[in-house]
Every structure is written in structure tokens, then in C-alpha cells.
Amino acid sequence: MTMELVSLLESGSITLCGIATILWIAIGTLARLEKGEIITQKIVATLCIISAIMLFSLHYLGGELWGSTNVARPLAVTAIIVAITGMLNIKGKDVQGETNPHQIMKMRAAEKMEEE
């Protein structure tokens, strides 16, 4: 039973981390609507937290990840950090103070309209 659980934790944690990574990469596309950005950020954070729990469990059950018994815990901490940082820019608030590409396009369109 323990080996089945370890195998499930290995596969599940890697799968959830992969899905979270794909969503993280696609956030620019999904952020065109504020609601889409919020939902995506919450999904990524949830997947990362679940992955972290699974990775910590895997570590304490003595499971291996990529042939190492020491990899699961640092990956779990990384997943928690990604979950926290992913939620910083919630509700379209500009945390970093940088202009995003969509705002640049709107500004350029507004400038062209003024010139005409």
C-alpha cells in the first residue's frame, strides 16, 4: 500500500507541477481579461500548494523523485514560493510598476487616434 501511495504521489506531484508551469507560461494570454487573470492565478496557486503537500508527503514517506530522495523537499518549497508570488499581481494590480504589452498597445492606438 505504501509503495502505491509513493508512486501516486510521484506521478501526481509532477503532473500538477507541469500543469501549473503551462498555466504560468500562458498567463499573458489568459490575462487579457481581468477575470481570466484572477482565475488563472488562483488555479496556479492551488496547484502549487497541492503539489507542495504531495512533495512533502513523498519526502517523508521515503519516495524518490528522479532517482533522488532529497529533491522533493526543495521542490515543495519552490512550489510554495511560486504560489505566493503568483498571487501578488492579483486583480490586475500592477505590483512591479511596469507597463504591460496590452497597455502599450492601447497607448499607441490612442496616439494614432489623436494624430488623425
Image (tube, grey):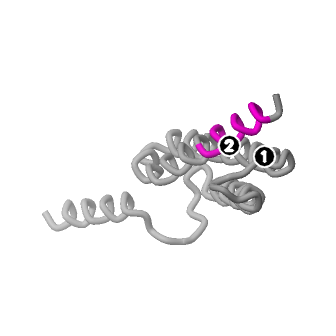
What type of secondary structure mainly makes up the magenta span?
A: helix
| In front of the other: 63 or 114 | 63
Kind of residue at badge 1: Leu
Residue 43: horizontal and vertical position, in percent?
61, 40
Q: Residue furthest top?
A: 1
Crowding at dot 2, Cα within 10 Å, few <14 / some 14-19 / many 20+, comes out as: many
Which SS class for mark 2?
helix
CB within 8 Å, label 2 to label 1: yes
Residue 84: horizontal and vertical position, in percent?
71, 57
Residue 98: horizontal and vertical position, in percent?
49, 71
Quarter containing the C terminus:
bottom left
| In front of the other: 58 or 23 | 58
Query: Image quadrant of residue 39?
Result: top right
- What residue do we see at 64% from left, 42% from top? 42
**Residue 29 in the figure: left or right of residue 91:** left
Residue under label 2, please give it. Answer: 10
- Height in image: 95 above or below 65? below
- Cα distance in 3D space between marks 2 and 1: 7 Å
Q: Is residue 4 magenta?
A: yes
The numbered dot on residue 58 is 1
- What residue do we see at 54% from left, 43% from top? 19
Kind of residue at badge 2: Glu
Query: Image quadrant of residue 106?
Result: bottom left
| In front of the other: 53 or 43 | 53
Quarter containing the N terminus:
top right
Which badge, 2 or 1, is on the more N-terminal residue?
2
**Residue 87 in the figure: left or right of residue 59:** left
Q: Residue furthest left?
A: 116
The numbered dot on residue 102 is none
**Which residues, given as a range, are shown in magenta?**
3-14
Q: Is residue 46 magenta?
A: no
Crowding at dot 1, Cα within 10 Å, few <14 / some 14-19 / many 20+, comes out as: many
